[in-house]
Image (tube, rainbow, N blue to C red):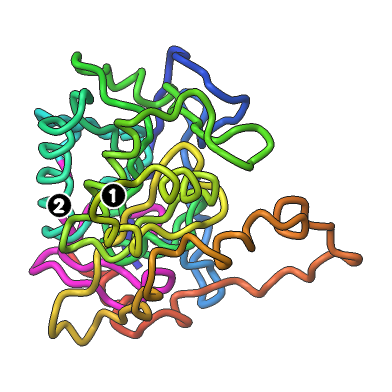
Amino acid sequence: MRFAAAIVLAGALAAMVTAARAQDIRPSGFQLPPLAAVTAQTPAKELFGRVTRPSEGPDRSIGFYSNGCLAGGVALPLTGPTWQVMRPGRNRFYGRRKLVTFVERFSRRVASQTSWAGLLIGDMSQPRGGPMLGGHASHQIGLDVDVWLRQMPAQVISMAQRETIMSTVVVSDDKLDVNGYWTPDTLQVIKAAASDPEVERVLVNPAIKKAVCRQARGDRSWLQKVRPNRGHDYHMHVRLGCSPGESSCRPQRDVTPGEGCGRELDYWFTDAVLNPRPAPQPTKPLPPFTVGKMPGACAAVLNAP
């Protein structure tokens, strides 16, 4: 197999810290070591994580959001009039053309309808999608994007600062509700994402979903797309659906009807969920997830020019 050079991550300068968590910061100068050998048992994440360019040809999603790859990926420009890509050294700013177009359209809407100058964009997909070395189970087919819940500043952030600057955690320490960093504009940003016709789901922390349910006024139909999920306290995960007629892309089940503000939301605030007990015995490690376990076309995508 052919692989491109390792990704180099840069970083300097700490900025506004709203929680004592790393948010996936890597040390300055971090570099992926080369693989000594590639076998049928080499984890797929080790291979896809080292590819630095998209494959040639038209863009296509292959497989499922958590088991698939991306052909013909397109890079989101690192800086636009109403968006800036964070953690650029991770090289996870690729997606389908329609995802790039969505980010551009969505960020313009946020800038025109709120006090935010624009959006800070987190991970999308790797150049050829596939599993990542860390941070996500999904984001594999070019249809997912993380959007930070911290407004973009009016000035352009330097590339070095983008590697270490923190997002804003908007969930209280007890995980029961939002905190003082939550604002009416935060609500409007989530609403703008969920109201876009191409968006299939917006994943947020259960405490954020609770606040959205409590504060939404007028037309509440968009609440159906806002789904509670673990984590997601400093960003929202926006997911587009498969393109109509694209048989290579496996869609998710339809979103559950209704606002999702009743008993199904209460579940997330039970003691068993908020304070899960450790397993009585250590979990047996799973066997490596290899390219052979992915859709057949992904091996070709990995080796394509």
Residue drawn at x 29%, y 32% is 120
Find disc 2 in the rendering and name its residue.
102
Asked if the magenta segment contains residue 193, the reply would be no
Picture layout, residue 282 above or below residue 291: above
The quadrant of the image that shows the N terminus is bottom left
Residue drawn at x 28%, y 49% is 52
| Secondary structure state at the residue bearing disc 1 | loop
Find disc 1 in the rendering and name its residue.
52
Q: Position of residue 172 (x, y in %)?
A: 60, 33
Residue 182 is marked as none
Neighbor class of circle 2 (other Cα within 10 Å; few <14, some 14-19, many 20+) is some
Q: Position of residue 209 (x, y in %)?
A: 46, 50
Specify the segment rendered in magenta.
Answer: 48-76
Picture layout, residue 14 above or below residue 182: above
Mark 1 / mark 2, whichever is N-terminal: 1
Q: Position of residue 238 (x, y in %)?
A: 32, 54
Left/right placement of residue 191 relative to residue 277 reads left
Q: Nearer the viewer, mark 1 or mark 2?
A: 2
Marker count (numbered): 2
Residue drawn at x 12%, y 59% is 98
Residue extending farthest right:
280
Left/right placement of residue 119 relative to residue 292 reads left
Picture layout, residue 239 above or below residue 236: below
The quadrant of the image that shows the C terminus is bottom left
Label 1 sits on what residue type? Thr
Mark pair 1, 2: CA separation = 23 Å
The image quarter containing residue 3 is: bottom left
Label 2 sits on what residue type? Phe
Picture layout, residue 297 above or below residue 196: below
Asked if the magenta segment contains residue 74, the reply would be yes
